[in-house]
Image (spheres, helix red, strand yellow):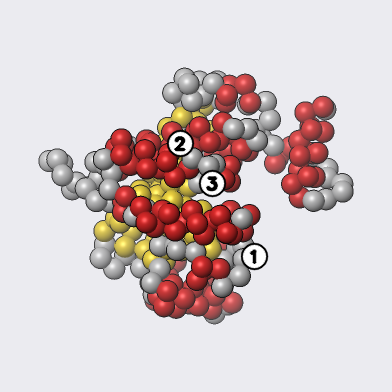
Amino acid sequence: MRQASELALSDAKTQGESVVFFDASLHQHAGLEGPLARALQRGEFELHFQPLVDVVERRVVCAEALLRWNSPEYGLQMPRTFIPSLERSDAIVEVGAWVLREACRAAALWGGVRVAVNLSARQFASRDLRSVVLGALRDSGLPPACLELEITESLMMQSPERAARLLAAFQEDGVRVVLDDFGTGYSSLGYLARFPLSGLKIDRSFVSAMEEKPDGHDVAIVRAMVGLSRDMGLELVAEGVETLGQVKLLESLGVRIMQGYYFARPSAQWRPMNVPGDQ
């Protein structure tokens, strides 16, 4: 009961509500704090990769690194189960640095296929983020242009001035920065002109809604995203693509890079085909 009340209090502070009822389904991570605190030291984290496919040229251009926790006690855990616990502590910064290093090390063997890494709020706010990124590139030998950092609109809006400086620094370093879940936040489109971005990722909610209502508002919004990204010179990616119908609809709108179960599920064994050294 005490743990539940503490979690509800944390939710109330985060949501800005005066009254919050504890919802156990939102806190599946409760009780995992102890084993999770030792997971990195024990080597229990692993990366799974999911490809981003250019459907016009029929080739993989990038792969997103997705964190998994392979716990001896609880089995393979998805991020929604353990990330909230990591984010409430400084451990998320250390784990995030590990993800960067391992993702760069893996992609260094991919023959030019990029790797995308998600940044957490605490990681993005860390003062040494740039040095961690540059260190991961240096140690792995991965060219900066082969690394993508994925951030959300909410991260940028926490401190727009700092975000603009940090993104400009990454651009100077040659590292790509992509805005994830585009269209679901509340930031002004004017901010896109301020931030040196390399690409946008259409949120999966638009993709699923488009197939249900091909003549609905979501299609119009995606069509606008296509024009916006083209005019600004940004790469546009649709995530959460699960059916051939979605592929055809997105392609008809001008989206050429897609990610989702239709192409491949995340896998620890994934690697591009026909990279140097393959037989």
Q: Which numbered disc, 1 or 3, marks the residue closer to the eye? A: 3
Across and down, in percent, residue 224 comes to: 50, 77
SS for dot 3: helix
Give the Cα distance between marks 2 and 1. 28 Å
Which callout, 2 or 3, points at the residue further toward the start of the chain? 2
Across and down, in percent, residue 55 comes to: 31, 65
Give the Cα distance between marks 2 and 3. 11 Å
**Whether residue 252 is situated above or below residue 264 in the rendered picture:** below
Residue at 60% x, 63% y is 184
Nearer to us in this view, 140 or 40: 140
Q: Is residue 23 left or right of residue 193?
A: right
The amino acid type found where label 1 is placed reads Tyr
Asked whether the viewer can see residue 198, the reply is yes
Find out whether the residues at labels 1 and 3 contact each other: C-beta distance under 8 Å. no
Q: Is residue 81 left or right of residue 72?
A: right
Question: Which residue position is annotated with label 1?
Answer: 186
The amino acid type found where label 3 is placed reads Phe
- Numbered label attached to residue 97: 2
Q: Quadrant of the N terminus?
A: top right
- Numbered label attached to residue 269: none
Q: Say few, some or many: other residues with alpha carbon within 10 Å of mark 1 (under 14 / 14 to 19 / 20 or more).
A: few
Q: Quadrant of the C terminus?
A: top left
Give the Cα distance between marks 1 and 3. 19 Å
Which callout, 1 or 3, points at the residue further toward the start of the chain? 3
SS for dot 2: helix
